[in-house]
Image (tube, coloured by chain):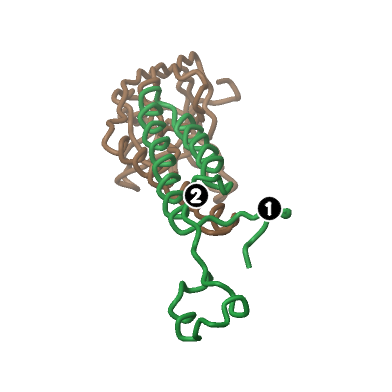
Chain colours: A brown, B green
Amino acid sequence: MHTFLSRVNAVSAFSLSTLAALTFLCFASTFFINYKAPVTITAANIVLKNVPEYAVSREKNDLGALRFDLSSDLTPLFNWNTKQLFLYLTAEYETPNNKINQVVLWDKIIKRGDASVINLKNQHLKYYFWDDGNGLLGHNNVSLTLSWNIIPIAGTLPTWSGTGSYKLAFPSEYTLGRSY
Amino acid sequence: MMDTVMGFSVHMDFEGQKLAERLFQIIVVAFGAGGWLYGYYVQDFFITVLTLGAGFVLACLVTLPPWPIYRRYPLKWAPPEDAAASTSASETATGKKKKK
């Protein structure tokens, strides 16, 4: 403390320790917040095809396709410890092959400061809805759910699901041709 | 012996060092606590970081330069050996320890 540089060192080190403590307190102040929010999902234009997925094998697998409407107000999820949200739409269903199938169909990143009210109409899927066999044919209990990862400024990376899902039914015959 | 920056002597005496350390602790913690509360109020952590940064700058201005308030208790050195030849060596050794 008697030289200039040792005082620079002491003040800087003490300020950084204080910043670390404040950051931890910021995390602690948001740790118990409930990040649920209501979501409305509907789907239409549901078609089902049976085509080879060459990335896996030459065998034909079920490929679903649909358009969806999605609306939700995610503004309450943003607080001072939220940096961005990662939203993803999941289809979950049960088949004879697997007790639980989860396929991510679509995702979106909402950064802090972006519009946080979602209102999508007639949206295409972003990723292929492949089943790992023929489990989608005539399946009438596929639920679409929106979930999100909260990416914080400091702290844990919690995953929450929206309340409200859509129950999807696939046709019991494959769609032929290229028409969607 | 005394450290200098560009020709200026920058040392503080012991009491001054104690005061400077206490002052920057108070300033940084006060700005940090106030910034945390205000950042919580407006729900923006960047405000907290900016306020802490302002406290850091203020603490630097207050405690880095050797202001006169930090030099009010200069050490009383024993007189040099040759100027006071009559004083014995044992008395000199019991004087104030040299600053490191």
Residue A85 shows in the view = no
Q: Please, which chain is the residue tagged with disc 2 on? A: B
**How many numbered badges does the structure rendering display?**
2
Q: Which amino acid does label 1 sit on?
A: Phe
Q: Which residue lies furthest to the right in this view?
A: B6
- Picture coordinates of residue A141 (x, y %)? 30, 30
Q: Which of A29 and B55 is in front in this view?
A: B55
Task: Give SS at disc 1.
Answer: strand
- In the image, taking residue A177 as reference, residue B26 lies left or right, namely left
Residue B57 shows in the view = yes
**Residue B31 position by quadrant:** top left
Which residue is tagged 1? B8
Q: In terms of sequence position, does the residue under pointer 1 or pointer 2 come before the other?
A: 1
Above or below, A12 against B57 in this view is: below
Q: Which residue is drawn at the image coordinates 47% and 74% (left, top)?
A: B97
Dot 2 alpha-carbon crowd within 10 angstroms: few under 14, some 14 to 19, many 20 or more: many
- Picture coordinates of residue A129 (x, y %)? 48, 34
Q: Which residue is drawn at the image coordinates 38% and 31% (left, top)?
A: B34
Task: Give SS at disc 2.
Answer: helix
- Picture coordinates of residue B48 (x, y %)? 44, 33
Q: Please, which chain is the residue tagged with disc 1 on? A: B
**Residue B45 position by quadrant:** top left
Q: Which residue lies furthest to the front in this view?
A: B86
Q: What residue type is labelled 2?
A: Tyr
Which residue is tagged 2? B70
